[in-house]
């Protein structure tokens, strides 16, 4: 007989889930303020609310030839650096990939049930963030301490990430400490390559995982 389903799980409203927009709103605001200050510092007018044109002193004009322009190498380096920052996979992107996975017991996502949380995800990059081995560590929180589908949920997360992330990423999935009575056993199953490979060859199991991933964006 299978374990009983948690009939009254805690449900988080979708609007309350962390997103890329909410995570970067404060950063965008600070960048806007910085840009505004830079514009003011470049202004030809005195830093006052009123502008007296009669007393305005214009700086000497400089020809285009005298002005220093960035070299092609400098422009190329700047573009590459900006591109690397934009393309860098972080915790928010991992959360976005797995948050919409459906729970196998409930018509809700793992994020809505707080099975996966942004603060329980950690991404570690190598020295060369574009080519070296990177690691993704995820701790999942089952809805009940005797959840019989914890391994299935972890497997669904692994399949989702392995399909979406570059091969250089190493994925480690654990049960959050103290949230499951068979924590150690489930952890071994989720991080054993042979067991994971065998599970992924089970057509019936893959059908269930495909249903879980069907809601992913």
Image (cartoon, rainbow, N blue to C red):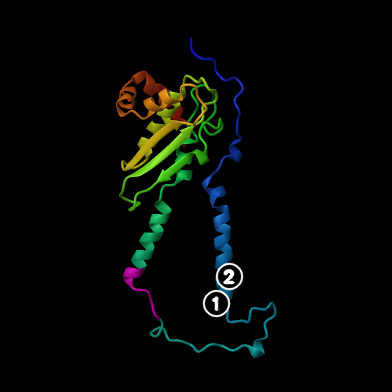
Which segment did they paint magenta?
68-74
Residue 42 numbered tag = 1
186 or 9, which is in the foreground?
Answer: 186
Residue 149, image x, y percentages? 46, 21
Residue identifier under label 2: 37
Residue 86, image x, y percentages? 42, 54
Q: Tell how many labels.
A: 2
Residue at 59 percent across and 25 percent down: it is 9
172 or 185, which is in the foreground?
Answer: 185
Tell me which corner region of the image, top left, top right, bottom left or bottom right, holds residue 58. bottom right
> On the rendered structure, is 33 left or right of 168?
right
State whether residue 183 is above or below residue 20.
above
Residue at 41 percent across and 59 percent down: it is 82
Q: Secondary structure at mark 1?
A: helix
Question: How dense is the environment of label 2, judged by Cα within 10 Å: few (below 14), some, or many (20 and up)?
Answer: few
Q: In the rendered structure, does residue 70 fall within the stretch colored magenta?
A: yes
Residue 32, image x, y percentages? 57, 63
Residue at 31 percent across and 23 percent down: it is 198
State whether residue 46 is above or below residue 146.
below
Residue 92, image x, y percentages? 48, 44
How far is mark 1 from mark 2, CA to CA?
Answer: 9 Å
Question: How dense is the environment of label 1, judged by Cα within 10 Å: few (below 14), some, or many (20 and up)?
Answer: few
Q: In the rendered structure, does residue 99 fall within the stretch colored magenta?
A: no
Q: Residue furthest right?
A: 50
């Amino acid at each position: 007989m299978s374990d009983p389903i948690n009939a009254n799980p805690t449900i988080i409203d979708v609007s309350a889930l962390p997103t890329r927009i909410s995570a970067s709103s404060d950063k965008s605001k600070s960048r806007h303020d910085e840009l505004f200050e830079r514009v003011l510092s470049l202004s030809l007018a005195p830093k006052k609310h009123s502008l007296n044109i009669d007393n305005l002193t214009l700086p000497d004009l400089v020809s285009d030839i005298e002005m220093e322009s960035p070299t092609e190498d400098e422009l190329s380096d700047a573009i590459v650096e900006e591109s690397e920052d934009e393309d860098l996979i972080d915790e928010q992107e991992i959360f976005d990939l797995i948050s919409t996975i459906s729970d196998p017991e409930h018509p809700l996502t793992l994020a809505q049930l707080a099975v996966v949380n942004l603060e329980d995800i950690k991404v570690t990059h190598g020295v060369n963030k574009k080519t070296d081995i990177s690691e993704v560590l995820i701790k999942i929180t089952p809805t009940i301490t005797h959840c019989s589908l914890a391994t299935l949920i972890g497997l669904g997360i692994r399949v989702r990430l392995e399909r979406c992330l570059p091969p250089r990423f190493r994925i480690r999935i654990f049960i959050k400490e103290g949230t499951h009575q068979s924590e150690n056993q489930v952890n071994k199953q989720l991080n054993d390559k042979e067991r994971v490979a065998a599970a992924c060859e089970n057509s019936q199991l893959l059908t269930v995982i495909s249903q879980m991933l069907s809601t992913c964006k």
